[in-house]
Image (cartoon, grey):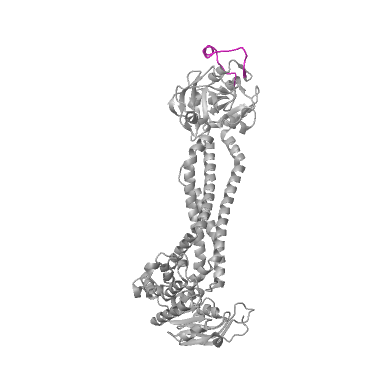
Amino acid sequence: MNSASAIVSLSVKSLANRRVTAGLTVFAIALSVMLLLGVEKVRTEAKASFSNTISGTDLIVGARSGGIQLLLYSVFRIGNATNNISWKSYKKITDAPYVEWAIPLSLGDSHRGFRVLGTNNDYFKYYRYGRKQNLQFVDGKEFQDIFDAVLGADVAESLGYRVDDPITVTHGLGQTGGINHKDKPFQVVGILARTGTPLDRTIHVSLQGTEAIHIDWRGGSPLPGMKVTAEEVRQLKLNPKTITAFLIGLESKLSIFKAQRQINQYRKEPLLAILPGVALQELWDLMGTAEAALGVISLLVVGTSLLVMLAMLFSSLNERRREMAILRSVGARMTHIFSMLVIEAGLLVGAGIIVGVALLYAGLFILQPVINAKFGLFLSFDIITLRDGLILLGIFVAGLLSGAIPAYHAYRQSLSDGMIIRV
Amino acid sequence: MIELQSIIFRWRPSDCPTLHIPQFEVPQGESVFISGPSGSGKTTLLNLLGGVVVPEEGKVTIGDQDITALSNQARDTFRVDNIGFIFQQFNLIPFLSILENVTLPGHFSSQRRQNSIERSGSLEADAKRLLAHMDLDLNELEGRAVSLMSTGQQQRVAVARALLGAPRIIIADEPTSALDTDTRMAFLDLLSKEVEAVNATLIFVSHDQSLASRFKRSIPLEDINTAKGHQ
């Protein structure tokens, strides 16, 4: 063993001797590392799942309001439309030659907290998410009948529904309250594969279905004395008069702006057409401040944990004067004294990082199902990314650099103490 | 041989000199007792001999090396190669085992490591040999925390460490002051015997005049240090 490895071994043993304070320091660093990586993970996964929500759609069209609001209610099922758009306008616009496909969306009802979306079978044909992936069925098939329903993966999983189960739609939103459409129950005919998007939390029915359950309603409540049964409703012509929004795919990407302008200038009704990518970016930018704040907070926590380490190293210096003097007398150089403290800082931060990463994965393992169920955010278990690695390296270097402060102090102290042992 | 020539040393430029030693010599193998009250500059002298501090003027020659001419790092290496230290008290690093404490100099001096290995085959074996010489039963003490040993035992471990790898010089700074009278004399005899056995030079510093009779040569520090007005 040469002097270098002797110094490393001395650092390790010295820390082991102070295992309680050293352990607490490591734990503080570990928690901060876990927090920083955790925030980073949630941020990147949220952004990914966010921009994966919709793909392959050229324009989203709704009643004139804000672009972000339209995106939120049509794609993320957050909030409500202020206005509906007429079926006539939908027909008129989508009849244009540059439109390849269109998906009508009708929102407003729910089932036990999950949104019910009225649409048509083109939804299963044209809707794309992630990297232009199609929707897949894990069970059953598309809706055919007026009262057929297709469930998103989360809906099926958290409510335990299977194909052929009956469900009752509630007017309006929310777990409870609202008025039930119990007179016209739906039947589950299909369950979609998980997409990691709000679609997993949606119940899909036909436009005729949403129309049918509201046939004896006017202005948001049932018409007194008017009762149309489920059987009677089948005899009726169920053409929707209004929808909430619609998605458009164009024949050619070149006509996007032309189509957007035409829709925005549509005279019969105030409409708004947005490009999903642009609106997604706007929305993400809106959340950028919160995201940056989270990042700053986690950085501050890391800084605090390094301060904890500094406090611990500094407080030990005085009681270690004798140790330093003995080491000097047996030939330790000033550089050895200095490096011993830096090595200790390195060991503390290194251990903190390892424990922190372990805590992060343990936390992910435990919380992943909960987060997925509650927030629809799927946190993958992938290995540490290059970016995470760089962050960890940064923390390690910061730890070594801050270790240099008490190390320099010890150096000065030992230089003036020499081999005088102060009892 | 140790030789001090025209030494002037002061801690701060504005201070009066702590040490002013025109000439002082110790031949190799001799044991010298240097006495002096506390504050007379004994510790400074030891720091000077160990090369921890350098004098403003003058030469400190050990063997045939003027250590004031060496760089800081070279002096650190020279110190551990040539000198074993024994301090007043708390000589041992509390979180190291007895054996680890004794072998410490061997990790910083390749010369002393080499000497130990030539003598006993390995650093540990040499440390065990020396501990046995110091009447310490390692089997009995093994695994015991250094801080739980008696002061006398701790001081003997410190001697074993100072002797490891046969340095030419042993410097002892009041090594007996923490010991009671009975163990004090026994400790002194043991130290002298072991130092003589390896033909090392012993510089023994103490304020305790009663120990002077045990040494062939005994000098009050005032006789070699002509500095006046130091605290």
Looking at the image, residue A60 lies above or below residue B11: above
Q: Is residue B150 left or right of residue B124?
A: right
Nearer-the-camera pick, A269 or B115: B115
Give the quarter of the figure containing the C terminus of chain A: bottom right
- Could you say which quadrant of the image residue A174 lies in? top right
| Residue A181 in which image quadrant | top right
x and y percentages locating residue A39 in the rendered image = 54, 45
Spot occupied by residue A91 in the image (x, y as percentages of width and height) = 57, 20
Q: Inspect the magenta stretch and tell me whether residue A115 lies in it.
A: no
Question: Can the viewer see residue A389 in this picture?
Answer: yes
- Quadrant showing the N terminus of chain A: bottom left
Along the viewing direction, whichever of B33 and A10 lies nearer the viewer: B33
Q: Is residue B43 above or below residue A337?
A: below
Give coordinates of residue A61: x percent, y percent.
59, 28
Q: Quadrant of residue B43?
A: bottom right
In the displayed structure, A80 sits above or below B182; it is: above
| Residue span colored magenta | A221-242
Residue at 43% of width from left, 26% of height from top? A139
